[in-house]
Image (tube, rainbow, N blue to C red):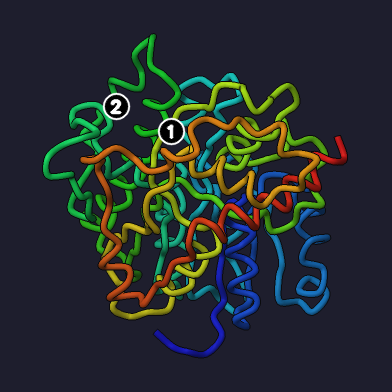
Amino acid sequence: MSSTPLRVLVTGANGYIAQHILSTFLSAGHSVRGVVRSQSKVTQISTTFSPFVSSGQLDFALVPDISVPNAFDSALLSAPPFDVVLHTASPFNYRANSSPAEFLDPAIKGTTSILQSIARVAPSVRRVVVTSSMAAVIDFIGSPRFTNPPKTYTESDWNPITLESALAPDASLNVIYQTSKTFAEKSAWQFMEQKRPGFDLVVLNPPMVYGPLFDPAVVRDPKTDLGESVHGIYQNTLAPGLAEDSPLAPTGLHLYVDVRDLAQAHLLAATVPEAAGKRFVVCAGELTAQKIANIMRDTTPAALRGRIPRGEPEKENMPEGAFTASSGRAKEVLGLEFRDAKETIGDLAAQLAQIVQKE
């Protein structure tokens, strides 16, 4: 693809990951349109990125419901026309009392809707990058977490979860989320195979995404204004009522990537020709709840350290045999490099400390 500045559409532009993506593309000189659901989100992002809005390098489109047919048609009309579309929009809020449809419809129908709209009204688009998840890769139910030798997940793996499992009356939010990401990605690859559009597809599959907020100033209440992964760190290490002797929350998915590295992966996925038609596991390595707590304690002001559960600091690594993931393709094809966990969590810790001190 051309090294000249691109015209880029980014869906879900107000999200935690997407704001880092906006910054990465704008700083590289590309022209971006951010798609959001409401005017209030436009106002927030316009404030955060005001120099780029003033210069005309960043503009916006409203799409209130991404799951309806033709939802993206008007957003995709642009002069100059779009070269690349980044589809990052997908629901992910375990704190909301969400029904399966509130996860599944925007994820699956939103993905097919934007691909259909691109094929129909934006023939200039040459590449689409979809933000999927390791939730579409890992078998969380049928495969054990610990094996000898350990399982290494790659791009050839798929979560075997079924749509029926998400629609069951007792389905957990984890199951519903995994299903939404798995079938959203499958729908994208199926569309490419069946329709053979004039653009190619690249998919990124990150695990847990950690690291600093792009604009911590917009967080007024950490209980409601933080994205899911960052809220988890706040809730488990700095929330009111915690103490050193509080139980340490168990480790969920023990694989992570820094949000800034994931944003860079989107830029590379959009511009490296050899990325076409590939999915990429984007994983920096292992990160447990204990290691997060240890780093938070090492990098948080002394006045707040008493809130952080101590756990067992010497046991910060996963037990032997825990599954892992290979980012070999992302390193070889995209040239992607990864920050270490101390930088990822340390940079976030400084922001969370400032937020907490305002409570």
* Residue shown at 45% from the left, 55% from the top: 257
Question: Which numbered circle lies on residue 278?
Answer: none
Nearer to us: label 1 or label 2: 1
Is residue 272 toward the left or the right of residue 278 in the image? right
Q: Locate residue 173, reporting x and y percent.
A: 45, 23
Give the CA distance from mark 1 to mark 2. 26 Å
For residue 33, what is the image quadrant? bottom right
Three-letter amino acid code of the residue under disc 2: Leu
Q: Nearer the viewer, residue 73 or 318?
A: 318
Against 264, is 346 above or below? above
Q: Which mark is residue 163?
A: 2
Residue 242, horizontal then vertical, whole percent = 69, 25
Q: Is residue 100 above or below residue 319?
A: above
Which residue of the protein is positioned furthest toward the front in this rendering? 314
Number of other residues with Cα within 10 Å of mark 2, as a class: few under 14, some 14 to 19, many 20 or more: some
Image x and y of residue 230, in percent: 61, 42
Nearest to the observer: residue 27 or residue 148: 148
Which callout, 1 or 2, points at the residue further toward the start of the chain? 2
The residue at 39%/35% (across/down) is: 180
The N terminus lies in which quarter of the figure?
bottom left
- Kindly identify which residue carries mark 1: 251
Q: Residue furthest left?
A: 148
